[in-house]
Image: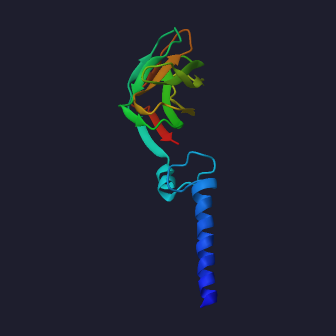
């Protein structure tokens, strides 16, 4: 029995040493980690796991829009409903199709959040007048946490002519919150 008691004492002493390291010098698993020596507990780790959130913001399969402006300023093309963002980087995937009345006209698309500053997504030269051409691109932005309206804007780069979208065209914007 003497050896058994000593074995129990060894376990107890070892447990004390482990506890001292966990609760003092080595950090703790009882709270949210703050210090570099703190160890994260399971509840904290589970709360930090996030998966990409995919949002279909705009899907218009039959837009009827035209833009004959020669100012090369952006005009709002389509807006999303109010969407909640988590404040993390978000990958915006954009695609559209359009046509122009003049060959070699350039059509540019951009995005803005809540009507703020426009960010260019893509400028596309349409080489053949009257043909529908697809345009697609992506951009990563970080909207602040909260509800926002995302706007697709467009502009023409030519001196004369009209860029248009008809029921044969589309506008799609998907967001993946990373």
| Position above or below: 68 against 138 | above
Total numbered badges shown on the rendered structure: 0
Query: Which residue is situated farthest in the bottom direction here?
Result: 1
Q: Residue furthest left?
A: 81
Pick whichever, 126 or 7, lies toward us.
7
| Left or right relative to 2: residue 31 | left
Quarter where residue 122 is shown: top right
Residue 111 lies, in percent from the top left, at 49, 25
Q: State whether residue 19 is above or below residue 4.
A: above
Q: Residue at coordinates 58% horizontally, 63% vertically from top-left?
A: 19
> Looking at the image, can residue 79 be seen?
yes
| Location of residue 55 in the rendering, given as x and y in whole percent from the top left corner | 43, 41
Q: Quadrant of residue 21?
A: bottom right
Q: In the rendered image of this protein, does residue 73 appear above or below residue 63? A: above
- Image point (62%, 89%), residue name: 2
Q: Residue at x 49, y 41 (%)?
A: 176
Quarter-of-image position of residue 121:
top right
Q: In the image, is 89 to the left or to the right of 147?
A: right
Task: Residue 101: tell me if it is visible.
Answer: no
> Dividing the image into 4 quarters, which one contains the N terminus?
bottom right
Percent across and percent down for residue 110 are: 52, 24
Residue 113: % across, % down = 45, 25
User: On screen, 66 above or below 131?
Assistant: above
Q: Nearer the viewer, residue 47 or 11?
A: 11
Residue closer to the observer: 51 or 163 = 51
């Amino acid at each position: 029995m003497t050896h058994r008691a000593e074995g129990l004492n060894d376990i107890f002493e070892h447990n004390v040493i482990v506890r001292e390291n966990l609760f003092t010098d080595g950090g703790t698993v009882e709270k949210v980690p703050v210090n570099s020596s703190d160890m994260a507990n399971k509840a904290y780790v589970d709360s930090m796991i996030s998966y990409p959130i995919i949002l279909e913001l705009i899907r218009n399969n039959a837009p009827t829009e035209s833009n004959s402006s020669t100012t090369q300023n952006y005009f709002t093309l389509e807006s999303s409903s109010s969407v909640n963002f988590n404040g993390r980087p978000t990958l915006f995937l954009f695609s559209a199709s359009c046509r122009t009345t003049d060959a070699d006209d350039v059509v540019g698309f951009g995005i803005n959040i809540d009507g703020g500053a426009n960010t260019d997504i893509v400028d596309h030269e349409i080489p053949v007048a009257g043909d529908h051409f697809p345009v697609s691109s992506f951009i990563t932005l970080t909207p602040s946490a909260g509800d926002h309206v995302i706007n697709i804007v467009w502009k023409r780069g030519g001196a004369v002519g009209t860029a248009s979208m008809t029921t044969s065209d589309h506008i799609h914007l998907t967001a993946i919150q990373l």
